[in-house]
Image: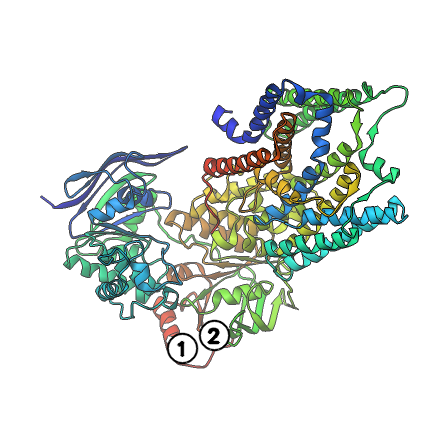
Amino acid sequence: MKVSVFIKKYTMVLALVLVFVLFTILTGGRLVYSQNISNLLLQNAYVLIMACGMLLCILTGGNVDLSVGSTLCLSAALAAKIMDVGGGAGTAILVAMLVSCAIGIWQGWLIGYIHIPPFICTLAGMFLFRGIARVILDSRTIAIMDNGFLNLFTSYIQIPGVDTNKHCVSALVVGIIIAVGLTVYMILDRTKKEKQGYEVSSMGSTIAKAAIFDVLIVAYSSRLMGYKGIPVMVIWILAVVLIFAFLTSQTVFGRHFYAVGGNEKATKLSGIDPRKVYFWAYFLMSVLAGLSGLLVGARIGSVDGNMGNSYEMDAIASCFIGGASAYGGSGTVPGIMVGAILLGVINMGMSILGLPDQFQYIVKGAVLLAAVIFDVVSNHKTGKS
Amino acid sequence: MADIILEMKNIVKEYPGVKALNNVNFKVERGKIHALVGENGAGKSTLMKVLSGTIPCGQYTGDVIYNGQIQKFHSIRDSEKAGIAVVHQELALIPELTIAENMFMGNERRTKRGTIDWNQTFKEAQDAMKRVGLKESSHVLIKDIGTGKQQLVEIAKALSKNCKLLVLDEPTSSLNEEDSKMLLDMLLDFKKQGITSIIITHKLNEVAYCADEITILRDGQTIETMENPDHSIDEDRIIRGMVGRELTDRYPKREHKIGKEILFACKDWTVYHPVYTEKCMDDHVSFNVHKGEVVGFSGLQGAGRTELAMSLFGKSYGSHISGKEFIGGKEVHLKDEADAIRHGLAYATEDRKTNGLILDETIARNTTLARMDKVASKYGILNVKEENREAEVYVKAMHTKTPSIQQNAGNLSGGNQQKVLLAKWMFAEPDVLILDEPTRGIDVGAKYEIYQIINEMVSQGKAVVMISSELPELLGMCDRIYVMNEGKMVGEFTAEEATQEKIMSTILSSDSSKAGKAV
């Protein structure tokens, strides 16, 4: 592969690597302390999870869901309130998720079947749901004390007797197992494809790819080893991300989102109902927002009326930085993961350096703009007619 | 020594991976009408882009010599200042603005203070319109005049820039026969006024009618330039030059194996406009198609053929639809497009770019779009390898020119895009295919291949309904031809009895008559 083609294909990954190295140097190595690497995904769990749903909305035609920060807050508020008045964690989670589903059905129906423009509908939702959350919270902050709830989302996997807080061997072991498994799978898959006569990349490049993944996985898990081990939240993140990656790339259902975003008229005339597609995009988005509310609530340990403020922007930015098209029809889950992690690294790096919030805002905006400009210019994209 | 107004010498233009223009040499005599013909992708539009400055100096090699001087145009403004005006195939008019505003867009008449002098603008627009025979007021909105007149506005716009060299790209592609002839006569008139015209067109009869000289491009190279002094040039000779091979028949022969079974029929089908619900688009239309038969639908624009097809295809158009629809002899009530596809119906839209294909998607993914379930497990998990395999099969069978099935549909030429569209519908395994303008905007060579594909479809026992505005095409391909006008079925001819004149006169005589023709 020529260098210029390589750079174009993996721009954001290269940017991520660059930024990571840059901040590692700037922070004198503090960025890669175990605690920081461990927290990197945890702090951004809600971004990674919500970006998956936001991708679906963006795929349908560059549409976004502005209400997710508020849905997140409402979900957390409901859970916290229920546990506060003596309800069990199970009830709290169930109610929060059911309400999130209801919100999803409501917005999905309005946007998909009544044809309310998504921007306006979700903008209204942004106010509505946060208002309801504040009513539930009675404008107070409610702390979450239920250990069952907290552990479900914020605990770490530690095998007693083998792991200690500072040296959680199980993390590394799991990492190595995953790395080996992935390598074996990639090589076997290639061999199978080759036998069936399909085009495959050279064995060398497959091994190189596997090697890179292996190094990353083992490095990551060795960092986790140094700080409490594998966080349960990482498992939540992985589950959501893997499910959505699978859905968008391997299923007919996922393909529909790309089709509608690519050309809604042609898709309708091909027998696919765009209304259903819009519905599912906004429904799934709200469900993920609800889940994120529980995660964030557990992580912070309390819920107030401002929680989730402008979280939708993080999800949206991650998607566009990760290569989703503002016109719809393209974007992948791995791409938006890179986008989300890139933003996360920048945030964390600047925090470690002690830069005040306003700088983080400036950098976030600049990165988003740079990413989109680069994307449009390098692909000579013109607006869809 | 002939007076050469334009000479384009040794023009080379490369895009990544393809040489669009490969040492093209092109000379135009002053005061003549020069036709530029060639298949899609031959380089005609690219050559004109070089001429007009759309492809600026520096991005091509070679010389553009206008009025004896080498020109270095950096933008369209430069070429317009020199007196060259281009009227594009796609009308660049803003429907919500007036004729005058469109005509002087960016070029409005100014007062001494520098603000726009609207009075002067509207007046000059009116004068310009007189030159092209437009009698409307220049205050009329573009959306309120027909396509034919809009085309004239474009030409008036070009003339108002004092052009001496007028380039027209497919000027009659969206005009009916009457308006087309008027436009060509106007070009002949311009000759008398000293204006030189270059006309790019697929319509060889028009070339024969008005062109004095004809240059043929193929694969980015100049093949030959022919003279047409008494306008009697042999169209077949032009085709040979364009395509590079003998086309003994423009329409491939086939065995007519028409079964007794009626695969598709409709009776008293009535459709109203989706928004203006009093407007009747199709009025008690009835027709049928047999197994192995190609049935044509002729008619002028607005006859209601596309509306008929789309409403029959799962009610994808129209409101207050009534009447009976029969597939395979059984009456059906199709709820939506998916239902229609399930019942073995396929509809290839007349506009493949906006309604037919997803231009940013690969050929492979476009091919399976209507029946993804065929390449997925029952739980909806796609088998991408299977999808790719199927796409390869169709690309091979239809000779679709593409480096790979992972190429985006938008990167293909018109003819190949149409093949992908047809492949998609073949993949859906229908019994009845409705093809709406299947060869619109496609060059002669690709048209032939599309006709072969259609013949293949009916030889497999399918039924094909072909909606087309090209009467020769209908006469060459169809077993029966229905004639529609103003939403009504007004005639039906077998292949033996049909002629262009008979069809035309049926249409024209039905304009004032009220009787439809039952089938």
Q: SS of the residue at dot 2?
A: strand
Q: Residue at x 45, y 52 (%)?
A: B451
* Amino acid on which the number 1 mark rests in the picture: Ser
Q: What percent of the width, then of the height, locates residue B183?
A: 27, 62
Q: Circle 1 marks a residue in which chain?
A: B
The residue tagged 1 is B510
Colour basis: rainbow
**Residue B406 in the image: x percent, y percent?**
54, 38
Q: Name the residue under label 2.
A: B488
Q: How many labels does the image show?
A: 2
In the shown orientation, is residue B385 left or right of residue B289?
A: right
- Residue in view at x 65 percent, y 18 percent: A29
Q: Do the residues labelled 2 and 1 touch (CB within 8 Å)?
A: yes
Viewer-side residue, B86 vs A270: B86
Work out whether mark 2 precedes mark 1 in sequence or the reverse, and give the earlier one.
2
- The reply, left or right, for residue A130 in relation to residue A372 is right
B231 with respect to B270 (left or right): left
Instruction: Tell me, yes or no, if residue A157 can be seen here.
Output: yes
Above or below for A307 versus B507: above
Q: Are marks 2 and 1 on the same chain?
A: yes
Q: Position of residue B443 (x, y in %)?
A: 38, 49
| Crowd class of label 2 (few under 14; some 14 to 19; many from 20; radius 10 Å) | many
Point out the residue furthest to the left here: B1
Find residue B118 and report its image quarter: bottom left
